[in-house]
Image (cartoon, rainbow, N blue to C red):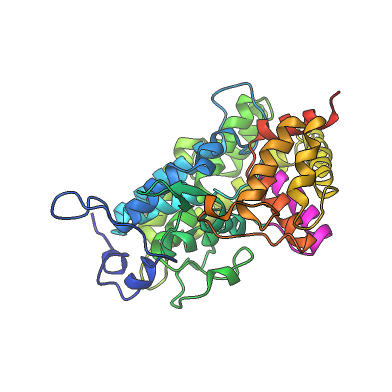
Amino acid sequence: MIKKFEKEAMFEGNPKWEQAIKREEKLYSPVYGDAPMRTEFDRDYTRVINCNAYRRLKHKTQVFFAPKNDHICTRIEHVNLVESISNTIANYLGLNTELTKAIAVVHDIGHSPFGHQGERILSEISEREYGEKFWHGENGLKFVDDLELLRDTAGLKRNLNLTYAVRDGILGHCGNPSISGQKPREKNINLKEFNYSNKYEPFTWEACAVKIADNISYLGRDLEDAREMNILNDRDLQTIDKAIENIKVNNTNIIGYLTGDLCKNSTVEEGLKFSKEAHEVMEKIRNFNNEKIYKNSKIQPTIRYFKVLMNEIFYTLKKEYNGTATVKNIRKMKRYYPFLAEEFSNWLETFSNSDGRENDKYVNKIVYDLNDIKNYCRAIINYMSGMTDQYIVRIYNEIISF
C-alpha cells in the first residue's frame, strides 16, 4: 500500500502541528504509568462520544422522519458511516486516522431535529428574528465550545474544549467536492469567522477526507432507505442503473467505487480528487436522489408540520422575554407547560446572566446576555437545535394539549 500523503499527515513534526492540537483552554492531563494513554485527537474522540449532544444523534432525522423501521438510517448512524469511510481513505493514503475519527463523529453535532428541513426552518426563524442564518456547522462549533458540558476530574462541568483541528473539521465538512480536487488551507484563522458553508477550506488533509467521506456516505444509503420506505420502486432504481454504466447502483458498490477511485486519483499536488468519470457518477446519483427522494411528495406534509411545530415553540418561549428576569417568567409557565418550563428554564439559567443565577454553582462561562432580546432569541434557536425529533414533538404536544 502506497501511503501517498504520509508526509502531509497531521502528526508531530508537521508544520501545522502545534496549531492543530491547540485548545482554547488547558485540558487536564491524566497520566497512567510513564506516559499518557491517549493522543490529543483520541482524547477529543472520547470527549465527543461521552457528551449528550452526540448521544442525541440516535434520535435525529437523517432523511426520513420518525421511521418505524429500525433499519432506516438516523443521524448517529450517518456519522458512524462517515467515520468508517474517512478511516479507509486516511489509512490508505497515510493520514492520521485518529484525527479523521474525531472529526467524523463530531461533524454533525450541531444538526437540528428533522434533518436539513429542520435546519432550513430554524434558519428562516433566525433570519426573521435577528438577521442571521442558522447553519449546523457553526452551530456545532457553538455546542462544543459553549453548550456541551462534561465533568472534569474535580467533578465540575466544563465545555468540551476540543483541539483546533477537530473544531475546524466541524466547520469544514460542508459542501460538495470539486472536480479540481480538495486541498487544505495553509493559514490559521479565527474559527468564529468561519460562519457559512465553504467560506474557507479545511485546515488539514484529514478534515478534507472527512468532507469527501460525508458526501460518499449518504448517496447509496439514502437510495436503500428510500427503497425500503417505498419512496422508490424497482423501476426508479432501473432508471438510475441505466444512467450509470460504471457500476450497479447500490450502497456497497457506490462506497467501494467512489472510495477506491478517490484513493487512486488523489495526489499531494492535485489534492483529494475523483476521476472525471467518478465525479460524474456522484453528480448523477446526487441529482437523482434530490429529485426522486428529497423532493418526493410523500415528504412534503412533514415539512409543513415541522414549520408549524418549530415556529409555535419559538413563539411560546419568545413571548416570555423579560430581560434578566426571563427565567423567572418561564418558570411561571409550569402551570400550563410543566415539562418545557422546567427544562428550558434550567438550561437557560446555566448559560445566561439571569437574575438569581447562583454563580458558584456553575464554572461555565455566560453565553447569553439576556439584556438583549436578540441574544435570547439565539438561545431559543440553539436550545431547539439540540432537541431530538421525539423531544421537540413532545414539547409541541404539551403546548397544544389541555
* Residue at left offset 62%, top offset 28%: 227
Query: Residue at position x 84%, y 25% from top?
Result: 401
Judge whether 240 appears above or below 91 on screen: above
Q: Quadrant of the C terminus?
A: top right
In the image, the segment drawn in magenta is 115-134
Quarter containing the N terminus: bottom left
Report which quarter residue 224 is drawn in. top right
Q: Nearer the viewer, residue 33 or 136?
A: 33
Q: Can the viewer see residue 245 in this picture?
A: no
Residue 279 x/y as whole percent: 53, 56
Corner quadrant of residue 203: bottom left
Closer-to-camera residue (32/138): 32
Q: Residue furthest bottom?
A: 187
> Left of 185 or right of it: where is 302?
right
Q: Position of residue 50 (x, y in %)?
A: 43, 41
Inspect the magenta stretch and tell me whether residue 118 lies in it: yes
- Up/down of 342 relative to 149, above or below: above
Across and down, in percent, residue 331 comes to 75, 40
The kind of secondary structure the magenta stretch mainly shows is helix
Estimate the x, y position of residue 173 in percent, counting from the top left: 52, 57
Tell me what residue is drawn at x 64 percent, y 65 percent. 196
For this rendering, which residue is in front, 266 or 103? 103
User: Residue at 43% across / 42% down in the picture?
Assistant: 49
Image height of 80 relative to 25, above or below: above
